[in-house]
């Protein structure tokens, strides 16, 4: 999921987070791209992706 709680009000965000928690409790693997701490906090593992270059047009040049 890419930013599953982006642009949501707090009540809807809570429902999405509850659904993610339920998937996790059932043993499912969920891959999420997120910036919000509430979403990241649910993760067992976190992979941080960052670019050392400011020029976004060339981000993939060194991946």
Image (spheres, rainbow, N blue to C red):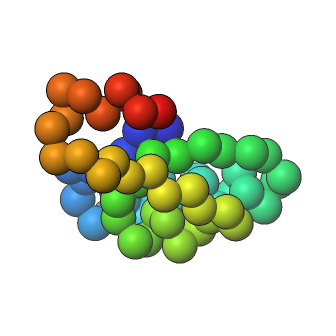
Q: Give above or below for 12 relative to 42.
A: above
Q: Give above or below for 44 relative to 51.
A: below
Residue at image location 30% in from the left, 33% down from the top: 59
**Residue 5 visible within the image:** no
Image coords of residue 16 (percent x, y): 47, 53
Q: Is residue 51 left or right of residue 42?
A: left
Front residue (pair 56, 61): 61
Residue at image location 49% in from the left, 65% down from the top: 40
Image coords of residue 2 (percent x, y): 41, 38
The quarter of the displayed image where residue 10 is located: bottom left
Image coords of residue 3 (percent x, y): 37, 46
Q: How many marks?
A: 0
**Residue 36 visible within the image:** yes
Q: Residue furthest left?
A: 55
Residue at image location 73% in from the left, 57% down from the top: 24
Front residue (pair 11, 53): 53
Q: Give above or below for 55 relative to 13.
A: above
Front residue (pair 42, 26): 42
Image coords of residue 17 (percent x, y): 50, 60
Q: Is residue 37 left or right of residue 22?
A: left
Front residue (pair 59, 40): 59
The quarter of the displayed image where residue 47 is located: bottom right
Q: Residue furthest right?
A: 27
Residue at image location 47% in from the left, 33% down from the top: 63
């Amino acid at each position: 999921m890419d930013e599953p709680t982006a642009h949501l009000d707090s009540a809807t965000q809570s429902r999405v987070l509850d659904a993610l928690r339920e998937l996790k409790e059932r043993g499912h693997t969920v891959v999420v791209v997120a910036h919000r701490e509430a979403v990241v906090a649910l993760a067992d593992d976190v992979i941080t992706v960052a670019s050392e270059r400011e020029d976004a047009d060339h981000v993939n040049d060194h991946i």
